[in-house]
Amino acid sequence: MPNQGMSTFIMWAVVMAVLFYFMVYRPQKKQEKAARILRNSISVGDTIETIGGFTGRVLSVKDDDVVFETGADRTKLVIKKWGIRFRTPAENAQPEKKEEQTEAANKE
């Protein structure tokens, strides 16, 4: 009898560990990966929103710092990459690439 109680306890511990993995650890790792991809994909011309609520257009990206301008008077701010919440790609970036690809295909 005491052995059966111990095996039940071990089974429940394993079930709880699996639930913990799928409900806490795995989603957190996915979120960290998405944030890392966001930080690494920032480029000049993108529109960003910081965790403090500032929005603006990226002027330069250096290592861990991002310089962006905001407001009508074009105030320049320097923030760390980890402080960026959202990124909207530059409007001109995608169409130019498509036009370049079309031109390259036509030349061939």
Image (tube, rainbow, N blue to C red):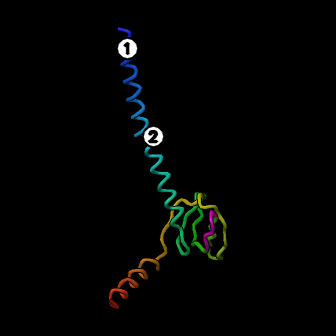
Q: Is residue 62 magenta?
A: yes
User: Dominant secondary structure of the magenta stretch?
Assistant: strand
Can you tell which of label 1 and label 2 is closer to the viewer?
A: 1
Relative vertical location of residue 88 with respect to residue 27 in this rendering, above or below: below
For label 2, the residue is 24
Q: Which residues are magenta?
A: 60-64
Image quadrant in which you'd find residue 60 = bottom right
For label 1, the residue is 5
- Crowd rating for badge 1 (residues with CA inside 10 Å; few <14, some 14–19, many 20+): few
Rendering coords of residue 21 (x, y %): 42, 38
Which type of secondary structure does the marked residue at label 2 adopt? helix
Describe residue 15's horizontal placement relative to residue 92 as left or right.
left
Quadrant placement of the N terminus? top left
**Farthest top residue in view:** 1
User: What residue is at 32 percent from the left and 89 percent from the top?
Assistant: 108
- Gap between marks 1 and 2, in whole Å? 28 Å
Relative vertical location of residue 103 with respect to residue 91 in this rendering, above or below: below
Q: Amino acid at mark 2?
A: Val
Residue 107 visible in this rendered orientation of the protein:
yes
Relative vertical location of residue 13 with respect to residue 57 in this rendering, above or below: above
Describe residue 102's horizontal placement relative to residue 39 as left or right.
left
Residue 70 visible in this rendered orientation of the protein:
no
Residue sitting nearer the eye, 42 or 71: 42
Rendering coords of residue 15 (x, y %): 37, 29
